[in-house]
Amino acid sequence: MQYRTLGTTDVELSVVGFGVWTVSAGWWGEFTDDQAADLLRRALSLGITFFDTGDTYGNGRGETLLARAFGDRRGDVVIGTKFGYDFYTDPDQNRGQRERPQDWSPKFVRFALEQSLRRLGTEYVDLYNLHNPRMDAIQRDDLFELLERLRDEGKIRAYGASLGPAIGGTEHGNEVIASRRLDALQIIYNMLEQDPGRRFFPLARERNVGILVRVPHSSGLLEGKYTPETTFPSSDHRSHRPRSWLIEGLQKVEQLGFLHEGRGMTLGQAALKWVLAEPSVTSAQPNIYDVEQLEEFAAAPDKPDLTPDDLARVAELYAAGFHLEKAPSSA
């Protein structure tokens, strides 16, 4: 495993983190508390120290799972959690992908942090991220003044913003990096979904903001295990995607064999190496479903780095829309 320091802080993250969403939210299959805690502990034994969750994941379950797994090893792990959604007055767990109301008032944010600390069984959070903030949150001086106070009080070590897929546009990410002293920006970014994520990199480097990457395997397409016959159970959120998402994605993946074939690594490992080749990326948080996959991803940092020619070839494929009918717009 390798480790990188987040921005200008003293918070050190494993370059492969663990997205606790997978084992707590129920969108990627069901895990008992014991199964989830065992997987989290195994991750730590493999050198993964950064665990990324959110207070809404399973209505707090992601945080209680971390307490269950690491209650006696708090100093060995780096915990990131998120805030901003008021699930206390809107606790319905059967909302699907409908959003809960957000509350960015200092009173609510302090309350939400205290609840997270209680569930985590800790006195501090290493990284506290705004969860899918809109411009109204980014423009609140009182919110960022509170975050600075919370840092001074020792309740958080660093803070940032996590952008969701529906609102990951440049206007939100650039505005929050440019106007606020963030330590981290979490985005979706992978070989098949490079925009708008890559547009944030120059400003992140300029402002010393660490980039955290969600969905580095494009919701599983870059894991190298799907076929045109693959189906997803109804509890899996990918079951609601159009079939074209899978078919076109696999056509793109077929063209990426040069990254891993004959190199002693899997496509899933190459996908992580590609993300980590970007200097502004501090850590990537893949979805992890079982021990076999956990061990595969944890071993990725120690695989050979991709060459400049590899990176250039991926860039050419992306610019050409992987030679399918519809090419993506250029950055």
Image: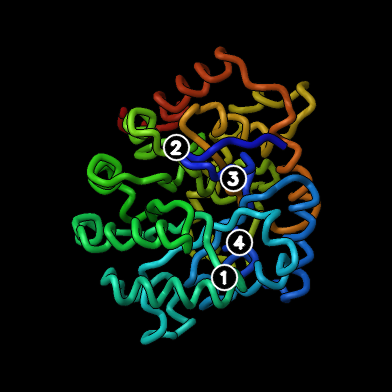
User: Is residue 276 positioned above or below 312 on the image?
Assistant: below
User: To which residue does mark 1 refer?
Assistant: 25
Which of pointers 3 and 4 indicates the residue nearer the eye? 4
Which mark is first along the chain, 3 or 2?
2
Which mark is first along the chain, 2 or 4?
2
Residue type, mark 3 in image: Leu
Q: Which disc is residue 221 wearing?
A: 3
Q: Position of residue 281 (x, y in %)?
A: 50, 35
CA–CA distance in space, label 4 to label 2: 25 Å
User: Is residue 146 positioned above or below 303 on the image?
Assistant: below
Quadrant into which the N terminus falls? top right
Q: Are marks 3 and 1 in contact (CB under 8 Å)?
A: no
User: To which residue does mark 4 refer?
Assistant: 20
Which mark is first along the chain, 1 or 3?
1
Density class for disc 3 (Cα within 10 Å; few <14, some 14-19, many ≥20) is many
- SS under mark 4: loop
Which mark is first along the chain, 1 or 4?
4
